[in-house]
Amino acid sequence: MLKLHEPVPAELRTSEFALRPITAEDAAMDHDAVMETREHLRLWEQSSWPEDDFTVEANRADVLDLEQRHAAGRAYTYTVLDPLGTECLGCVYVFSTDATFLTRAAVTPVADDAWADVQAVIYFWARRSRMETGLDGRLLSALRTWFAEAWQLDRTVYVTNEQFTQQVGLIERTGLTRRFELVEPNKSGTYLAFG
């Protein structure tokens, strides 16, 4: 479980997008964004997910699991929507360092940071067509402020795979620096954690 102030913030709103906890009812909107962005997500995930024949119903099962983990406080997933709530623009995932998949990873500090001191591990992605307009950069900027102010966290890391060079470059341009390298079993490429 994450050691966070409960309850965690329910939403983030800007003039361009809104974040709220994902629910199974979001499956179709989320699927549309996932499939548009699948080439990037395959690099990000270091897997063949989503397959070209990935269905809305298969996505609904995935999203229901995310919804249940969020409700139980095991991990938090937010859908990123346009201000009217009619289009999915991406997703944000918040984990503790003791999440199962992270405990299986080999974590190497790049400097003097201690993995145990990290308060939250954050992954995010933006819809491909919105990445082209710089939304992912504006989302990252808003997330940094949100986690510092609303979540009251000052030791967060943003993680991406080294092979997702577009996102690596984006994060590096924000002034965040590489703090850790993570190697997950059965995944190629190293995951980079910036803080």
Image (cartoon, helix red, strand yellow):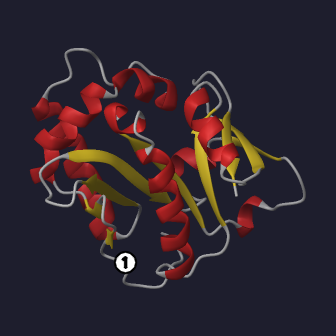
Residue 182 vs residue 10, the one in the foreground: 10
Residue 71 vs residue 85, the one in the foreground: 85
Find numbered disc 1 in the image and state the secondary structure of the residue it sits on.
loop
Q: Amino acid at mark 1?
A: Pro
Residue at position x 76%, y 51% from top? Answer: 177
In this picture, residue 128 sits left or right of residue 191: left
Tell me if residue 64 can be seen.
yes
| Disc 1 target residue | 9
Residue at position x 11%, y 51% from top? Answer: 86
Quarter residue 186 falls in = top right
Label 1: few (<14), some or many (≥20) within 10 Å? few
The correct choice, above or below, for 52 with respect to 163 in the image is above
In the rendering, at what x and y percent does residue 117 appear? 73, 69
In this picture, residue 137 sits left or right of residue 159: left
In the rendering, at what x and y percent does residue 172 appear? 69, 44
In this picture, residue 48 sits left or right of residue 112: left
